[in-house]
Amino acid sequence: MRANKMCAILGNVYECPELLPLTEKRPLATLPFDCKYRLIDFDLSNAINANIKSVYMIFNQGTTKSVFDHIGGGREWHLDSVDSRHFIHFYQDFLKKKTEGRPYFESIIDYLNKSKSEYTVFMGNRMLCNIDLEAVLKSHQQSDSTITVVYKKMPKEQIYRQDEILEVDEQGIVQGHHNFLEDKSEDVLFNLGMKIFICSTEWLINALQEGQNLGSPVALLDFLNLAMGKVKTSAYEYTGFLRNIFDIKSYYDANMAMLDPQKFSVLLYAKQKIYTKLKNEVATYYSPISEVKNSQFATGCLVDGKASDSLFSRSVVIEKEAVVEGSIIMANCRIGEQAVIKYAILDKNVVVEPGIKIIGSANRPIVIKKNMHVLNDVYGGE
């Protein structure tokens, strides 16, 4: 596929309060995942693997420090070459322009025009997947629909209350959609809209121009959801690995799924590579007294204690006789001697004093905020 066949818009506007305190100082998009990745790596990689060279990202103002730190010049995603580029804009700027009665989609329309792409893909920020966007595009081209939306059949416990459920007929055409909160059915599986859309760039430009004249929603996800009810929309069923990240439990479960070799391989070692920011660091050191079972470690860790069924980001220290079980330990944490950590998420730079116990449960893992110094035992869970 030629390089500018598609351009991409990544919408990172909607944040889930259920993910606090993990998203207190970072957007959902830059939440760490599986030791060395961030959630946004998957959307960026999905785009780059489809030979997309132009990416437009929308974030909330005041939450982008970690975005700039992680993406930088875009080198790891091949977005720093002469013919590649990425843009970051703030959602609040669009809101301000709408309030002032100005054309609030102006910068998006300008981006779309300059991209010279025939098609545009939009991706939200909560669906963790490794999807072949070229296959979705091919399906769209073979239909006579204005929009193609991606969905996956999912159980209700993996659906957020504000997610869209699609009503798809036997021909794969969307006949309607509704908010999950409004669904009263007893179905086992639901057609979860994955917040991934493909449409012609020309149609989108015209729709945005008309929409801003009529006062359409500023958020592109809301705009496209409304458009599904007005134009012919095809549905593309995704059958690969998917995790919907919307609260602490779903985030915890998504990470823990990576300890299953099959799920790990399907998501991260399929035919499409997932790219992330690279750091050249020393390998993790496992001392002769350490015990490690079914766990993953990033680089630069020092392990003297015991670890099982857990994931560790870069430069974590586990001192002797400390025990970590069923937990997610983010970068630069230090776990003191004889400390016990079970079913917990330790954000970056947490220090746990010797002998301290942090005990949660698989259903309600305990979250320790970034930069905390834990001096007392913490218990919770069900």
Image (tube, helix red, strand yellow):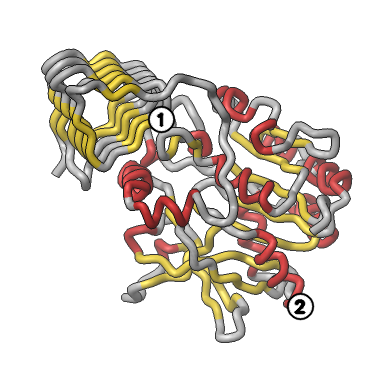
Query: Is the residue 91 above or below the residue 268 in the image?
Result: above
Earlier in the chain: of badge 2 and badge 1, it is: 2
Would residue 234 be seen by someone viewing this image from the given angle?
A: yes
Q: What x and y, as percent, mark residue 95? A: 67, 38
Q: Nearer the viewer, residue 67 or 25?
A: 67
Q: Please rate how many residues cluster around mark 1, counting C-alpha atoms within 10 Å: few if below 14, some from 14 to 19, many from 20.
A: many
Which residue in the structure is indicated by mark 2? 144
Q: What x and y, as percent, mark residue 225? A: 61, 61
Q: Nearer the viewer, residue 39 or 18?
A: 39
Residue at 30% x, 27% y: name it: 346
Q: Residue furthest front?
A: 288
SS of the residue at dot 2? loop
Q: Seen in the image, is 233 located left or right of residue 34?
A: right
Q: Disc 2 to disc 1, how far (Cα)?
A: 47 Å
Which quadrant of the view contains residue 154? bottom left
Q: Using the image, tell me which numbered label, if any, was put on residue 298.
A: 1
Q: Split into 4 quadrants, where in the image is the N terminus?
A: bottom right
Amino acid under label 1? Ala
Name the mark nearer the viewer: 2 or 1: 1
Residue at 46% x, 25% y: name it: 25
Amino acid under label 2? Asp
Would residue 162 be seen by someone viewing this image from the given angle?
A: no
Q: What x and y, as percent, mark residue 57? A: 67, 39
